[in-house]
Image (tube, rainbow, N blue to C red):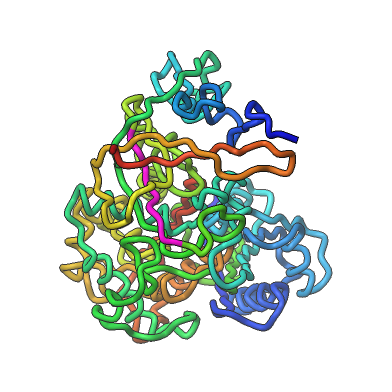
Amino acid sequence: MALDKAARKPIRDGLLAGALEDLDQVSLYGSHCPSCGETSLGANDVCPNCGGASVSRTPLSRSGTLWTYTVVRHKPPGNYQGPDPFKPFGLGLVELPDGIRVLSPIDAPPEQLRIGMPLQFHPYVLRTDEGGAEIVAFSFQPVA
Amino acid sequence: MSEVYILGAGIHPFGRFDKTYEAIGSEAAAAALKDAGVAWRDIQAAYLSRMYLPATSGVRILRKLGSTDIPVVDIEAACASGGAALRQAVLAIKSGEVDLVLVCGVEKMPRGFMDPSMIYSPWQIELGMSLNPGYWSMRATRHMHDFGTTEEQIAKVAYKNHRNSVHNPNAMYRKEFSLEEILASPLVCDPIRRLEICAPNDGAAAVVVASERKMRELGAAGIRIAGVAHTIARYSADFRCPADSMSATADNEGPTQVTARQAYEKAGLGPEDVNCFEVQDTDAFCEIEIYEELGLCPLGEGGRLIDEGVTDIGGSHPVNMSGGLISKGEPVGASHLGQIVEIVSQLRGQSGPRQVEGARIGLAHVLGAGGNCAVTILQA
């Protein structure tokens, strides 16, 4: 049976905005609260800051800068889906102009990581689930 | 409302033991009862703090001391579990319903990184966001960028705590390391190294707390609980597991600042009044940040404190005389009560080579997942 591209799913419900068959158009979802002005990650029904229920969903910017980072030097425990054998990788908070910092793997050589470096959103197919759907995950990459 | 006093404290060493959690916990509870000079049958309520143990752990542990029908309640608030349990005991006594309460913290944990499914969502685990030290390390990277804190200053905290541990028979590691050895130990998550982080392990600690009336009736001389507070982090005030993002605009005070202020206010004391501290050094950097947030110095100046020896035993604000979690290990549910055992020993003048001369007031602080923070201030 041929894979149905529409069967792509986000790695977490409500995390990704845009049609998943065209990854160039996909971004992270945010939820903007008009009461307190905060934007939270994902498609939320309630503002996690003030509890306001009139939040509106908005695609977040695909460009940001590295606010802080670490290099993970040991294979994370549990069902980690990264490269096997394990390779140390960057993990950081990416500040977006929407007023939010998002935790993300940083797809760059660890020695190149610097606070303030420009980064762009990179959605990709991580794996195929048991039903044949492609699971879409994300990282941030240095601007080419 | 009654003042609340600690009449007795007991500990089972922190480490790795071929022993059940029931045995580890009941030994600490029995030691606390013995130290208080009271019998288990006289206890009117008990709180058992733990994170990684099964349901009804408290009942299973404390029934080993003899049959009882008192309420025994398990409490979980991540690394602050022990503080949350102690606070419940204080509230119960202040309510006037009970006069004598046992609080016991216990944990038995496997070696290595903690089971991520306890804290993280499946998607975070798949993407490799499930390593607790990664979160602490990102805080360190940013602090170094903003304030010029150095890797050497971070290593000095580990050096101090390992050095203090040599005198603590209840610590898991009791070995002094040179600054060079610490800085040469492998990176776990940059910039934090293996000799700068704590390991999960086994252990238990317990206290018997009483109302003032009960203490007088028993003719005991207790240590007063001057203040105990527990909070969780306000919105985006703390970036700690399992956070997936934080606000770039909200500017809330961190959980340590908020909790410490509540505890200081209850005690009518400030950081300058406190003679000794036990704080959450899950990693060596974390201790530097806690100096600032407990008010030992302005924000950004924590590195200077370790350089100047202010937090050494013999300094003006000794921190982690016990060796801290870096050398004791962190049996999560037991860690705060372990700190309380150390402070009680310091305020009684029973700490031997690690004694802070003339200590009258001590503070214990824990902080962990979900931004759970607890601070307890004790006064002799």
Between B328 and A106, the residue placed more toward the observer is: A106
Residue drawn 57% across the image and 49% down it? B126
Q: Residue B39: x, y in percent?
A: 71, 74
Q: Residue B32: x, y in percent?
A: 60, 74
Direction from residue B272 to residue B372 in the image, left or right: right
Asked whether residue A94 is drawn in magenta, I would say yes
Start-end of magenta stretch: A87-95
Task: Inspect this view and state whether residue B219 appears.
Answer: no
Between B296 and B9, the residue placed more toward the observer is: B296
Residue drawn 55% across the image and 27% down it? A20
Q: Name the quarter where the C terminus of chain B is drawn.
A: bottom left
Q: Is residue B34 above or below residue B247?
A: below
Between B5 and B25, the residue placed more toward the observer is: B25
Asked whether residue A118 is drawn in magenta, I would say no
Between A26 and B212, the residue placed more toward the observer is: A26
Image label count: 0
- The part of the image, by quadrant, that contains residue B301 is bottom left
Magenta stretch, main secondary structure, is strand
- The part of the image, by quadrant, that contains residue B159 is bottom left
- The part of the image, by quadrant, that contains residue B15 is bottom right
Task: Inspect this view and state whether residue A113 appears.
Answer: yes
